Image (cartoon, helix red, strand yellow):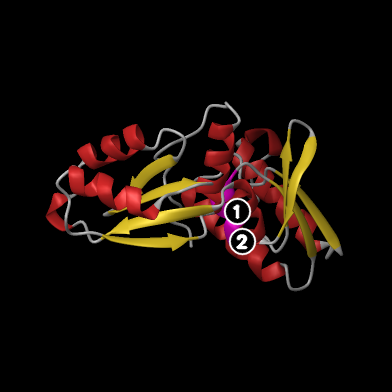
Amino acid sequence: YLESLNITPLLRRKGRELSKGQRRRVQMAAGFMIQPRLFAFDEPFDGLDILQSNQLAELLARESSQISILLSSHRMDVVERLADTIVVLFEGHIHCVGNLESVCRSLCRESILITHLGDSLDHSVLHVLRDEFPGALVNHFGTQYAVSGNTLDHLRIEETLARAGIRDFHLTRTTPSLVDAMNFHLKSSGIVWLEDAPRSTES
């Protein structure tokens, strides 16, 4: 655990000299060393950078075969990567519970991915889609767009792209990612959401 959480360089330092993220890593290492049957984490990725988050995610995935892990987090990208069962709380109550796909579809019925846009890819397409589908969540990553919502019209999306002068594209219906599903749920609930939320690079 000292190596997995990069604790060794911290051994000669006093606790008060450690940053929040460093203290959290030390606490986790100490917890794993006693080999508990259940390990509960409250926002374990808070204060960790991308590399440290990835290291911790790998450790949790590895240890989950021996230890039951209960984890609360606002990091939907990490939850999507690690969780067998997901519980979504909303305003202090359980909103939905289940495996990844069932929870994503409970929060947001589907996503339509738009790919193969080639040289025609530009931000004007993003604005066109958002104007045409104000109730949906529309964002992009790389050369791909995602339109997520509960009632998506495949043909209407095709027609909207055609009116925008886009011809070279392909549409695919899919289960929304947990990030998109949660952001759509927050948007539909009137809460501030993160359109164009960055995709995780951890997996």
CA gap between label 2 and label 1 equals: 5 Å
> Farthest residue toward the right?
37
Badge 1 marks a residue whose secondary structure is: helix
Taking depth in this image into account, of 199 and 39 the one nearest to the observer is: 199
Instruction: Kindly indicate the quadrant of the structure image that contains residue 86.
Output: bottom right
* In the depicted structure, whether residue 26 falls above or below residue 15: below
Q: Amino acid at mark 1?
A: Cys
* In the depicted structure, whether residue 141 falls above or below residue 190: below
Main secondary-structure element of the magenta-colored stretch: helix
Where residue 56 appears, as percent x and y from the top left, is 60, 57
Where residue 31 appears, as percent x and y from the top left, is 79, 55
Q: Is residue 87 magenta?
A: no
Circle 1 packing at 10 Å, graded few (<14), some (14-19), many (20+), is: many
Where residue 118 appears, as percent x and y from the top left, is 16, 58
Taking depth in this image into account, of 67 and 28 the one nearest to the observer is: 67
Residues rendered magenta in the picture: 75-82
* Residue carrying label 1: 104
Q: Amino acid at mark 2?
A: Glu
* Residue carrying label 2: 101
**Residue in view at x 34 percent, y 53 percent:** 155
| CB atoms of marks 2 and 1 within 8 Å | yes
